Image: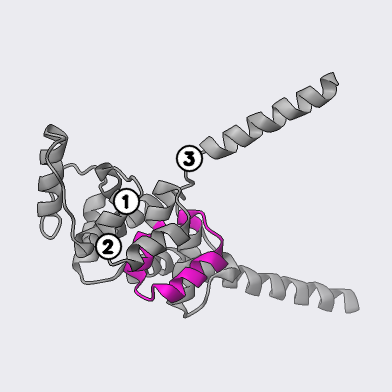
Amino acid sequence: MKKLIWISTASLVVLISTLAAPVSRAGVDISFGVNAPVGNDGNLFFSISSNYFDRQPQVVQDWGRRYPNPDDLAVFLQICAQSRQSPQIVFSYRNQGLSWYDVGVRVGLPVDVWYVPVAVDPRPPYAKPYKNYKKHKHDPQYAVRLSDRQVRDLVAVRMAHEYYGVAPEVAMDWRRGGSNVQVMMTREYRARHRDNRHDNRNDNRHDNQRNSHHDSHNRK
């Protein structure tokens, strides 16, 4: 009986810990190695998003069919991750015609979710959203409103900043170039891992040469 009570208690503790666990964030860039889709930025973006938002790759791909715009897919996954609401609920709110910001309000997201701290006041198009956010921090009664475009811009910056560890200002510059979040994330990934792939190819070539030399020597 005591053993049964102990097992039940332990199971309850594990369950509570699981429910209370924070949303997983990548924090650092990881290499997908041979599994990185070669020449397919769409699938590579799904892999990066799967790691960043802590979702199964197939789940990200499935929702990507409903949100072919990668900016909207990133916002959708961000709201799901931060609110802990089911994707179906978030999708239904958006499908009712609500703006992304209002979807966030509906699922209980605080204003802070959309922003990352910056050292200096950013330039456009981020100047106005951050100016309003600063007013809100000084006066919580001041209502912040964000357009869909502003939400997309802010999520793209947060994703690049947290995944690659670059300064928010750097991520903002990437975005100002007109790139959507898929282009931003995959371009940086390929730039960072190009040398690694080259080194791996050289290592494999050298290994093959050593093995060939060793086999030739044994046959003598």
Q: Which residue is drawn at 39% across and 63% down?
A: 92
- State which mark lies toward you, 3 or 2: 2
Q: Residues within 10 Å of mark 1 (few under 14, many from 20)?
A: few
In the shown orientation, is residue 40 left or right of residue 110?
Answer: right
Marks 2 and 1 close (CB-CB < 8 Å): yes
Sequence-wise, the earlier of marks 3 and 1 is 3
- Location of residue 68 by image quarter: bottom left
- Location of residue 203 by image quarter: bottom right
Question: Is 93 placed above or below 209 here?
Answer: above
* Residue designated by label 1: 106
In the shown orientation, is residue 19 left or right of residue 124?
Answer: right
Q: Which of 172 and 19 is in front in this view?
A: 19
* Residue designated by label 3: 22
Q: Give the range drawn in magenta.
A: 51-77
Sequence-wise, the earlier of marks 2 and 1 is 2
Q: Which of 35 and 149 is in front in this view?
A: 149
In the shown orientation, is residue 160 left or right of residue 138?
Answer: right
Tag 3 secondary structure = loop
Residue 95 in the image, given as x and y percentages of width and height = 35, 68
What secondary structure characterizes most of the magenta part? Answer: helix
Residue 147 in the image, given as x and y percentages of width and height = 18, 60
Q: Does residue 106 show up?
A: yes
Q: How crowded is mark 3: few (under 14 residues within 10 Å), some or many (20 or more)?
A: few
- Which label is found at residue 98? 2
Q: Does residue 220 show up?
A: no
Question: Which amino acid type is marked by label 1?
Answer: Arg
The colour scheme is one colour
